[in-house]
Image: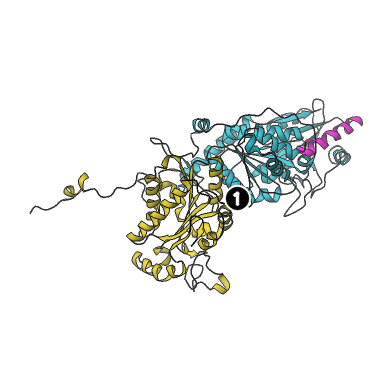
Amino acid sequence: MAEITLEDIIKPENLVYTKTKLMTDKVLSYCPGCGHGTAHRITMEVIEELGLEEQTIGVAPVGCSVLAYEFMNIDMQQAAHGRAPAVATGIKRVWPNKIVFTYQGDGDLAAIGTNETIHACNRGEKIVIIFINNGIYGMTGGQMAPTTLPGMKSSTSPFGRDVQTMGNPLKATELVAQLPGTYFVTRQSVHTPGNVRKAKKAIKKAFENQRDGKPGVSFVEIVSNCNSGWKMTPRDSNVWMEENMFPFYPLGDIKVDGQLL
Amino acid sequence: MKGNEALAEAAIRAGADAYFGYPITPQSEVIEYLMAEKPTDRTGMVVLQAESEIAAINMVYGAAGAGKKVMTSSSSPGISLKQEGISYIAGAELPCLYANVVRGGPGLGTIQPSQADYFQSTKGGGHGDYRQIVLAPASVQEMADFVRDGFDLAFKYRIPVLILSDGVIGQMMEKVELFDPIPRLTDDEINERYPWATTGKKSGTERRIITSLDLDSHKMEEHNHKLQAKYQEITEKEVRYELIDCDDAEYIYVAYGSSARIAQKAVKLARAKGIKAGLFRLITLFPFPSVKMFEMCGKGIKGFLAVEMSAGQMVEDVHLSVKGCSKVEHFGRYGGIVHTPEEVLEALEQKIIGG
């Protein structure tokens, strides 16, 4: 039997997957092993599958995903730190027929931008918020985040988060689920193929809600790893996430069609 | 009508697409008027009371970045909160209009009128090397007219434009002739006119990005060069001022806003005493009419008195303009106190003529 070469494999009939055209060819700035790349991809796949790319405007935050607009091949605005929900509100209010979403990390959404998050959710803005929670400030080099777990080490909690002096981790997703202005609130992860499929389904539902004019924010949290910030290998970080993050931030839907579960 | 109401009515008539604001004395009439007028019914204009000044200016950023004609307003402490957003708007080169109905500071200060936000308005306010066009109305009429003019300038240069008013102009009532309504742009017109606006990527076109970020410092320097060239062009083309009784004047008051009205009265009092006084009323504070001021300097002017409700801010630009060729002094009450014409005349006599 002849040896199989790469040319034998790369043929149209063998194609089982292509990168969505809504991701640019720019090399991702994320660390190898990080969940951001997957979260970007499934978000863009959903927009492509729903045929919404010509009417979608995304809002990038400050944080690791500050350059999301370099990778997402759609119209985008870069917002000041924490202000993405206000920026999205501005766009959606003047273009009510467009699809508007924010993509934010935990520091952006749940620390400096808590006010904008709570009020956009409470007003019931018809937008999608995608919230990446990795329990740490990745871009600035591993400082404590609003979502850092009790006892968890970071560069500004080098002996572990002491809740007596540093406060408690904030469950922003449970918080916004209580507000009348949220329509769909869910928590997902992208660390296994099965979880990626579930997360993508949730993101799809979120965008469908907006497309269909459902009243209120569709809010998708993705609990993600930060192997660099956590100082672990990618695999270890995913195991650590399952053992430590998921018990505190349990996966699953919290509010569906405006009803708390 | 009140100055603040004229500003609000002018926003509707100027064809604004949205107003985002947060109440603060002495300018809350702006959003109150807009809410009561139901501009959504009149023109389709959106009015939203935001949760903070910070949120309001970021709503402005988002809507402006999507090609819409959008504005906000506040008063001094609220304007301080907006500075981050204004810096981003300047960096991302978005057009927007905002008004500051200035009150006394620093801090929470007082709700009485002041002109102590001159530095913040003309020298930056937020971080980074940026400028904005600053229009200073001295009447309720100008509160209305400058909304229309301000939007035009904002879109001509893709720059934030500030209407720098104060508690006197915002609160006082005067007759005003309102300009005829200008229709809002249609969605198609926006798509056609503003190739930079994020309205959704059409197939076969490049995506549009609104950002003030570039991690490559060389590119960021280039971007700054471009901004500076724009500010230079504005300085050459958009200076506005008014000269009152300046033809034969030996002494010139330099003032803007409500101080200009008081100084104009002081000119009359001075002339009645035989003092040849005139008024150089600033209308644009940036760009500052430095060229004209320097030119006047050599023509028999014995001194300039900057009159402003601050401890001496605008006077620095007068100094920079006349470059030492004439005497320059400052007079002003501040912290919420408005000077009288008599005080302003006395200051001229003591600081310029007798000094």
Q: Which residues are magenta?
A: B252-272
Q: Nearer the viewer, residue B228 or B63?
A: B63
Indicate the quadrant where residue A48 lies. top left
> Which residue appears at 48% of the width and 69% of the height?
A149
Percent position of residue B343, x then y:
87, 41
In the rendered structure, the answer to whether residue B101 lies left or right of residue A83 reads right
10 Å crowding of disc 1: few (<14), some (14-19), many (20+) = many
Residue B129 seen in the figure: no
Percent position of residue B285, x then y:
69, 37
Residue, far left: A1
In the rendered structure, the answer to whether residue A81 lies left or right of residue B167 reads left
Percent position of residue B192, x then y:
49, 30
Taking the magenta stretch, the answer to whether it contains residue B266 is yes
Pointer 1 indicates a residue of which chain? B
Q: Tell me the chief SS of the magenta region.
A: helix
> Which residue appears at 54% of the width and 69% of the height?
A168
Query: Who's yellow, chain-wise?
Result: A
Q: Nearer the viewer, residue A189 or A8?
A: A189
Q: Colour of chain B?
A: cyan
- Look at the image and tell me in which quarter the C terminus of chain B lies: top right
Look at label 1 and name its amino acid: Ala
In the rendered structure, the answer to whether residue A162 lies left or right of residue B207 reads right
Residue, far right: B273
Residue B218 seen in the figure: yes
Percent position of residue B146, x then y:
69, 33
- Please give the residue where the numbered disc 1 appears in the rendered image: B55
Taking the magenta stretch, the answer to whether it contains residue A124 is no
Identify the element where label 1 is drawn: helix
Q: Is residue A226 above or below residue A79?
A: below
